[in-house]
Amino acid sequence: MSTSIKRIGLFTGGGDCPGLNAVIRAVTKSAKHRYNLDVVGVEDGFLGLIQNRTHPLGWSDVSNILTLGGTILGTSNRANPQRYPVKKNGQEEYVDVTDRVVEHIAANHIDALVCIGGDGTMTGAANLIAHGINCVGVPKTIDNDLVGCEQTFGFDTAVTIAAECLDKIHSTAMSHHRVMVVEVMGRNAGWVALHAGLASGSDMILLPEIDYDLDKICDLLTYRSRTGRRFSIVCISEGAKPAGGELSVSRRDETSPDPIRLGGIANKLAADIETRTGLETRSTVLGHIQRGGTPTPFDRVLATRFGYHALELLMEGVFGKLVVWNKGGIDQVNIADVAGKQRKVPITDPLIAAARAVGTGFGDLAA
Ligand code: F6P
């Protein structure tokens, strides 16, 4: 054990995600219980580091938060220290405020930092590491798209919620003999759509990794209708797009590490299907519901294991690592190796083969 660490900081960055509080609890309780450390909570992710907003975290602050959604520390997916907006002569300019962040870490006497977040946060953590800050990362995202990690916490909860919603959509689809197009989150990776689509028995699953052909989709839906299957469920990832077409972007936020916010593809596809096939078609966008509420028991366990392992790494003096879940166990990879990268669904993924085997369409092959 390294004895030089007396005080640790932790923050949650990027979009909120079920299980964040479970990590905060695990890190804080084991820091207190096993090593008697001081723990400092940084408010609102990198924004709190830039603005020097922190508070001490004690045992009572983290009691009874294991099942709580969101993050008690607050978060931000709009604060990037390397590209922070400031007003100069009435004009907005982007400047690098990393030195300010480093000063604030020193002013808070933080010996090491636990950075809980996705690829944007790990990119920021890699920058802090390059400036001499002792960091470890904990992989958070409902998108499950962090390179080097087979499962992030939050993903299981998002899939569970999305699958439950898809199950419920069946009632209306069946009763009204409709095509129901349901848009799920995931950014440029189709993990949520693939797992929730398969779990709910969706008739089509459309992924960012497989551009769809509207003719193929309509052929399958028409075939189902003609052969007595009077409703269809299409589970579409927000990052899916037609072959040769564009992503559906709902907004841009230039202050965010990833400025593009996806959304709207389900509406577009539903209109296209109805026009082309004459089948009554409706769309539903699940949105932030997928990130809300209590984490599943699986995510609570994973988050607790990640938090505990992150602290153990710090106390062993092992820095610059992201704690990951791989091949059924906890492992670690270099933050620098995964920062700024995204893990997408390979088209050879066994889940795609299994879904195709039970007749699920991916919008790419003939019915
Ligand atoms: O990365 C998590 C995520 O929920 C994505 O699935 C989604 O594209 C994005 O965040 C939405 O971001 P925001 O909360 O800023 O709308």
Image (cartoon, rainbow, N blue to C red):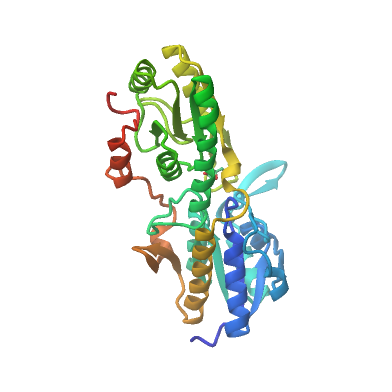
Between 13 and 240, the residue placed more toward the observer is: 240
Q: Is residue 249 visible?
A: no
Which quadrant of the picture is home to ligand 1?
top right
Between 211 and 155, the residue placed more toward the observer is: 155
**Residue 86, image x, y percentages:** 67, 49
- In the image, residue 52 sits, relative to residue 247, either above or below, namely below
Image-based side of 237 in relation to 366, left or right: right
**Residue 363, image x, y percentages:** 35, 28
Image-based side of 321 in relation to 286, left or right: left
**Residue 235, image x, y percentages:** 45, 33
Between 25 and 57, the residue placed more toward the observer is: 25
Residue at coordinates 56% horizontally, 33% vertically from top-left?
Answer: 285
- In the image, residue 122 sits, relative to residue 194, either above or below, namely below
- In the image, residue 185 sits, relative to residue 119, either above or below, namely above
Residue at coordinates 60% horizontally, 42% vertically from top-left?
Answer: 288
Residue at coordinates 51% horizontally, 47% vertically from top-left?
Answer: 160
Q: Is residue 44 visible?
A: yes
**Residue 296 figure quarter:** bottom right
- In the image, residue 95 sits, relative to residue 314, either above or below, namely above
**Residue 178, image x, y percentages:** 49, 21
Image-based side of 322 in relation to 359, left or right: right
Quarter occupied by the C terminus? top left
What is the tally of numbered marks visible in this picture? 0
